[in-house]
Image (tube, coloured by chain):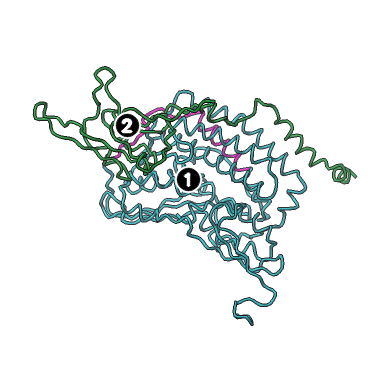
Chain colours: A green, B cyan
Amino acid sequence: MKRFLRRFLLLDLLEGLWVTFRHQSPSQIATEQYPSERPAVSERYRGAPRLNVHPETQETLCISCNLCAVACPENLIVVGSVRNPETKRKDLVHFTYDLSRCMFCGLCEDACPVDALELTQDFELASYTREGLIWDRQALEEGPRPTQYRQ
Amino acid sequence: MTGRDGTGLDGNEMVLNMGPQHPSTHGVLRIVLKLDGERVKSTDCIIGYLHRGVEKIAENRTYTQFAPYVDRMDYLAAVSNGLGYCLAVEKLLNAVATPRAQAVRVILTELNRIASHLLWLGTHALDIGAITPLFYTLREREAVLKIFENYCGARLTTHAFRIGGLQYELYEGFEQEVEAFCGQFLPKVDEYEELLSGNRIWRERLRGVGIIDAETCKRYGVTGPVLRAAGVGWDLRKAQPYSGYEQYEFAVPVRTGGDTLDRYFVRLDEMRESVRIIRQAVANIPAGPIMAKVPKVIKPAVGEAYVSIEAPKGELGYFIVSDGSTQPYRLRVRPPSFVNLQALDHMAKGALVADVVAIIGTIDIVLGEVDR
């Protein structure tokens, strides 16, 4: 009899519907309204690479040791340097980073002995061309400049 | 057997191509169905649409460099893949991760098991026609992915573990965040049960569909929840504990029916057991270093190693042959989805076309892993 009533009154469906209605409160919405509401990515987020410069002298921190290029599984980093005869150190000439092949594994960042190369929290990397994804030293030092659309 | 028209079919048979763009094949699986009316007479899986040659890539990368690639096989359980690979290389090196690293690895892989099962539950229910659970499961999965992002900086292709331990120390508030997730997640599992288990449509739709018995499972080499739903309590976490699983108390959920409904119940219970493991592990994470003493350039001695772990989908094995150089001589993956997919033909024989969708969903395949 009880089973018959359950079947007849569709109680099992109503139980499910009750769960659905319990979740109607706006406080439970997890959707992010992306362009107008920017997601807060975590501190350790592995996004766009950046080549750090000294905050005061604006000189690059990179010592051209080439360890990041060796660590990269995709071989997408090219470091160019010349030996400075006065200081006996290598001076960075160019640094290219091919983002179109990057999988953001973070191995280059781990390899860097002076924290010059870093994966940052910037995540908007879209480009209209393939060449636009190959970042040179200037782009790496400045970081991405996504277009901000306003109404 | 050749038919009169030379197509290999008799007069009543029809061939239907399902996939590779069909959404409920969960990726790019193509199945050639031979139908007699609505009944399936045989299925023929055509795979390889997502083949990237991962095993070959491994031969051209150093051991450290290959670690990010394993995340891209079973991309829903990237952390488990990373664990399996790291354990295999550690076995080659005769290294053992530190107790702290082991505890963190257990927490993250169990969280990943929950995330993987949640996505399975949502999409499986969606295939059957219940749309609501997808929204809830993805919302809960979001909490797990947030923990991954906070810990290692990526949500899906995590690259969380390194050979010998971990790269990242735990962040401030990790324990509280995981504990908070466990606390709010358990009632949610009951809620899914309320939505689905009691629902008559759901039960009628799944009961008796895609039955596979224990003997057949063993013959095909099927592992994971599919095997456990057929009545075999085989779980590598219990059978050959790795990464310190022997310290934790948990049950292996087993059902005896071997049908789609039982596989659903097994996975739900597994999520509850995972929460139990996570709670035990979080309560006492040992202090100490996170990285064992492993040389910077990984150059294992000549030899080979096979390590298998219990991934969310079944036994995930890594077999590595080392020739003493910095790159593997050969790396072979034993992916659970690939092996489990073989049983599809057995399960789908005699079923209706609509049941094939339910059966594929319940095997829980990820094509990135099937094709590699």
Residue occupied by mark 2:
A140
Q: Amino acid at mark 2?
A: Leu
Q: Which residues are magenta?
A: B269-295
Q: Residue at x 20, y 32 (%)?
A: A92
Q: Position of residue B59 (x, y in %)?
A: 32, 54
Find residue B370 and name its label. Answer: none
Q: Is residue B135 left or right of residue A110?
A: right
Disc 2 on helix, strand or loop?
helix
**What whole-number distance in Å separates the C-alpha atoms at marks 1 and 2?**
46 Å
> Would residue B274 be visible to someone looking at this image?
yes
Q: Amino acid at mark 1?
A: Pro
- Check whether the beta carbons of the residues at disc 1 and disc 2 lie within 8 A of each other: no
State whether discs 1 and 2 lie on one chain. no
Task: Name the quadrant containing residue A114.
Answer: top left
Quadrant the C terminus of chain B occupies: bottom left
Residue occupied by mark 1:
B241
Q: Residue at x 66, y 46 (%)?
A: B126
Q: Residue at x 21, y 30 (%)?
A: A63
Q: Nearer the viewer, residue B106 or B205?
A: B205
> Would residue B295 be visible to someone looking at this image?
no
Crowding at dot 2, Cα within 10 Å, few <14 / some 14-19 / many 20+, comes out as many
Residue with the most extreme right position: A1
Task: Name the quadrant containing residue B219.
Answer: bottom right
